[in-house]
Amino acid sequence: MITLIDLFGVAVFAISGALVAGRKQMDLFGVIVLAIVTGIGGGTLRDLLLGSIPVFWVHDPVYILVAGGAAILTVVSAPFLSHRQNLLLVADAIGLAFFCVLGAAKALEAGTGPLIAMLMGVMTGVVGGLIRDLLAGEVPLVLRRDLYATAAVAGAGLFALLMTLGISPTIAVWVGMLTALALRLAAIRWHWGLPVFRI
C-alpha cells in the first residue's frame, strides 16, 4: 500500500510540475525536468536526512519513469483540459496529502519518534513543490497566505499520533491523508490562512 501511495504521489506532483512548466512555456525537456524534481524532491531530502542511502529513486528507478510518464501524459492531454490553474492546485493538494503521510510513515519505519516523523512528513510534502516554484520563478505555494504547510502538519501529525496510539496503519494513513487534503482544498476554496504578522 505504501509503495502504491508513493508512486501515485510522485505522479500527481509530477503533473503539477508539468502544468507549471507549461504555464511558463518551457520546452519538453524543461517540462520533464520540472515534473521529475517536483515528484521526487521532497522524498530525496527526507531520505538524505534519515540516512537512507541510496535514496529511493536511485534504488528503484521506476519513480523516475512514473514522473516522466506523467509529464508526457500531461503535455498530450493539456490542450483538452479546461481550468488548468484549478487542476494544478488540486493536483498539488493531492500530492501534498499523499506525501506528508508517506514521509511520516517512512520516518517511523526508520525508528524516529512521532515529532520527527511529522517534520519528515511535512518536508516530504512541501519541498518538491518548493523546488518547482523556485525553478519556475514563482513565489512558492508554501510561502503564500493560504494554508499549505499547515495542512501537511495536520495530516502528518495526526497520522503519527494515531500510529503511536496503536491504531490500524490503514486507518491512520487514510485519516492523515484526508485531513491534509480537506484542509488544503478548503484553504483553496475559502482562502483560509494563518494570521499575518505585521509590524
Image (tube, rainbow, N blue to C red):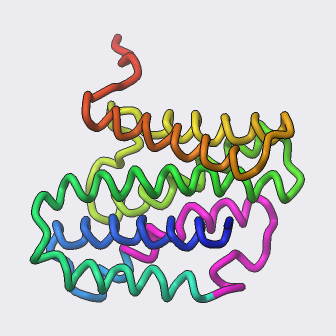
Name the main secondary structure of what is drawn in magenta.
helix
User: Which one is in front, 164 or 37?
Assistant: 164
Quadrant containing the N terminus is: bottom right
Specify the segment rendered in magenta.
Answer: 35-60
Q: Is residue 57 above or below residue 185?
A: below
On the rendered structure, is 97 left or right of 48?
Answer: left
Q: Which quadrant holds residue 130?
A: bottom left
Q: Residue at x 53, y 71 (%)?
A: 40
Q: Residue furthest right?
A: 111
On the rendered structure, is 115 left or right of 30?
Answer: right
Q: Residue at x 71, y 85 (%)?
A: 59
Q: Is residue 52 magenta?
A: yes
User: Which one is in front, 133 or 4?
Assistant: 4
Quadrant containing the C terminus is: top left
Q: Is residue 168 magenta?
A: no
Q: Residue furthest top?
A: 199
Across and down, in percent, residue 114 comes to 79, 39
User: Which one is in front, 108 or 164?
Assistant: 164
Q: Residue at x 66, y 49 (%)?
A: 173
Across and down, in percent, residue 132 comes to 38, 63
On the rendered structure, is 28 left or right of 12?
Answer: left
